[in-house]
Amino acid sequence: MPPGPWKSRFWVGGLLLWLSVGSSGDAPPTPQPKCADFQNANVFEGTDLKVQFLLFVPSNPNCGKLVEGSSDLQNSGFNATLGTKLIIHGFSVLGTKPSWIDKFIRTLLRATNANVIAVDWIYGSTGVYFSAVKNVIKLSLKICLFLNKLLVLGVSESSIHIIGVSLGAHVGGMVGQLFGGQLGQITGLDPAGPEYTGASVEERLDAGDARFVEAIHTDTDNFGIRIPVGHVDYFVNGGQDQPGCPTYFYAGYSYLICDHMRAVHLYISALENSCPLMAFPCDSYKAFLAGHCLDCFNPFLLSCPRIGLVEQGGVKIEPLPKEVKVYLLTTSKAPYCMHHSLVEFHLKELRKKDTNIEVTFLSSNVSFSSRITIPKQQLHGKGIIAHATPQCQINQVKFKFQSSNRVWKKDRTTIIGRFCTALLPVNHREKVICLPEPVNLQASVTASHDLKIACV
């Protein structure tokens, strides 16, 4: 046996002795492979598809290992007995590593004991958006070949969870379709809209692509898809303009991308925090805000869906319904979660015009407002108010009966009614709490009442 690079040989008394060079005569540790990172491209290099698969494991969440074949996987700490999360980014304007990916991977590994594999297709996703779209099929085939290597190692299809961002969501859908819809889960984070809103289910993400498909919509009026594409589709703040995002073009790139990327940050926040991002099924955002959808009985049998790693989003029925639109309101920054309460006002007498009442919850100098509209010739109106503070910490409620806008004289109209509220989901009327005394309101005058709700 010839000496290796770290061994020396000596002749002592006619005997050949092999000595290891190192402290205390021990063999030096096996060199660890270097951490791999995403590639960088530019608009002139962004047409070729140069795919990398980077493995991150719980024991070393900050160091990606480049894995191509089964031997790479086995030597890099991949555990076939754990679940596997595959993250697929979307179109890249600048040809650089996604700014959110490192935090996403670390948070995911803290939240669950799993293998996390980031799919780096920076080259194929950079340049012109429509060129990136053309690469979706080729990328999907490459991912399928890679996943087949996992199956050879004993990974089950049902343990694979694809998380696709924007264009990556449709890549995940195509991969799931090629596996006959047998992958465990696909999560689409604001699936891309351009080129996909009118596409067939074979070309885009849809509920048939995995055993459970969910999508979080935050930019349906721009870069995101407008239609439901999963079993459960979260339309956050209606799915369009997100609180805290710039509303004017002078904000530049942030104006263009903030709403679209909010889905990513919402998902990361859901992994980091215990406060639930719970949503409620409804026909439309307008109907939700008007208080017409208060529970999750239809179609979820009271199992309200939640964003995060909850199995099937917390939905406990089989078979799963498809393309259910669910709605929730959020704050402008992490952790984003809000509590949703029904607010109701019951007039003592009918009026010949609509009655608009602004309702404000107050807690520790923080306020949350909503509006109740009671149609003319009706006694009852309701709405939804979202509040970051738990309902039992709300200590005061304010009312302002909107004036009829009489310019020539002050509006002295008064109304009397009863105010009630309940934390969503409202499964039965026993949860509704009403103020003990009638509320008297004069137009344009703010009235305050104490609100006492026991903590559960």
Image: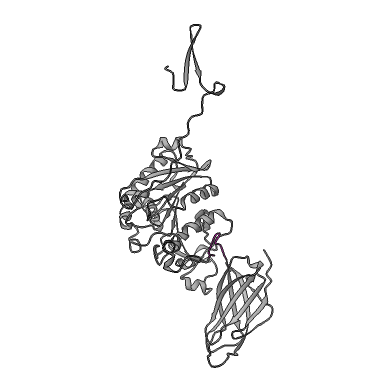
Along the line of sight, which residue is nearer the eye, 12 or 106? 12
1 above or below 325? Answer: above
Q: Toward the viewer: 400 or 288? A: 400
x, y (%) of residue 57?
50, 42
Left or right of 98 in this view: 378: right
The residue nearer to you, when weighing 352 against 30, is 30
Query: Overall secondary structure of the magenta stretch?
Result: loop
Identified at 58% across, 90% down, the residue is 411
Quadrant location of the C terminus? bottom right
Q: Residue furthest front?
A: 250
User: Is any atom of residue 422 visible in this view?
Assistant: yes
- Apparent side of residue 196 relative to residue 251 in the rendered image (left or right): left
Counting labels gives: 0
Q: Position of residue 283 (x, y in %)?
A: 46, 70
Is residue 317 in view from this perspective?
Answer: no
Left or right: 226 in relation to 308 = left
Q: Position of residue 172 (x, y in %)?
A: 39, 52
Span colored in magenta: 330-339
Check if residue 222 falls in the magenta segment.
no
Measured as percent of width and height from the top left, residue 331 is found at 54, 65
Classify residue 168 by image quadrant: bottom left
Residue, far bottom: 408
Confirm whether the magenta stretch covers residue 333: yes
> In what quadrant of the picture does the N terminus appear?
top left
- In the image, is residue 22 above or below residue 445? above
Which image quadrant is residue 374 in?
A: bottom right
Q: Residue at x 52, y 53 (%)?
A: 309
